[in-house]
Image (tube, rainbow, N blue to C red):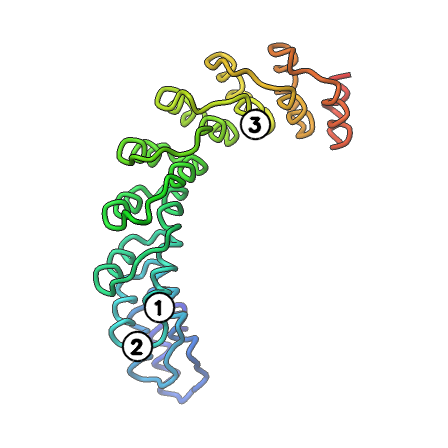
Amino acid sequence: AAEGGHLEVLRWFQANRIQKCGPSAMDVAAAEGHLDVVKWLHQNRSEGCTGDAIREAAANGHLEVVKWLHQNRSEGSTKDAMKNAELRCRLEVVKWLYANCSERCSEDAMCLAAEEGQLRMVQWLYVNMLEIWTSDAIDRALRGGHLNVLKWLQENCRQEGNARTIDTAASGGRLDVMKWLHHNRPNDCTKDAIDKAAASGHLAVVKWLHSNRSEGCSDQAMILAAENGHLETVKWLYKNIPESCTVVAIDRAVECEQFHVACWLQ
């Protein structure tokens, strides 16, 4: 009843002396953001709650519940609440804990926000907790394929990420990100770009790299495409980049039970 926010049911239980209750009642009510239930349990029951109440309320972004628990209960800590809020990118909770409890985010908060595409949180952290800034955030935004975050970081942050960002974008099949990197970080590419794109079967990316970049690829492109069963990619490589062809691709296709690829190559 507490988890579902059914306050009238809880009142009925109380009136009829149905006493099956424990600290978990307030915990789950807080986790679900049922502040009225949390208040009622606090006033009418003696079981209290555990530290999970404020931790889970923070994780789920229930700021008003977090505020009330901080002011009225002693269980749990605002440090743990901040940790959960940053893990789930709950910006409003993070801002309140920072302003009212002097809590700081961990060094990984910026990277987590970047990887999740939470641009507003990245911006706020950069302004208010610059000491946790790391160039790894650029790489994490890239890994998540969040072009808007990547653009902002590129324009506003002094440090560079790794020197192979196009390779990473190619591996994830993010053609839009890769095109932007091609114009803004043109030196961040190696042969691994086509190799990784082929390994994941991102044929459109392979084609674009072949037409727009000069790094080429290695025989790993064919081998990895074959062992992962990407027949169309194998066919295209065979026709357009013959230097990538190798008999090893047949062996790897057989080893990985990609028999349709092995048959075509033979």
Q: Residue at x 29, y 58 (%)?
A: 93
Q: Position of residue 265 (x, y in %)?
A: 74, 17
Mark toward the start of the polypeptide (1 vs 3): 1
| SS assignment at label 1 | helix
Image quadrant occupied by the C terminus: top right
Quarter in which the N terminus is drawn: bottom left
**Which residue carries the number 1 mark?**
54
Q: Identify the residue shown where x is 37% and y is 70%.
A: 53
The residue nearer to you, when weighing 134 against 52, is 134
Q: Amino acid at mark 3?
A: Lys
In which quadrant of the rendered view does residue 87 lie? bottom left
**Tag 1 and tag 2, C-beta contact below 8 Å:** yes
Residue linked to disc 2: 73
Mark toward the viewer: 2 or 3: 3
- The crowding category of the residue bearing disc 2, from other C-alpha atoms within 10 Å (few below 14, some 14 to 19, many at least 20), is some
Q: Between residues 157 and 146, which one lies in front from this camera angle?
A: 157
| Circle nearer the viewer, 1 or 3 | 3
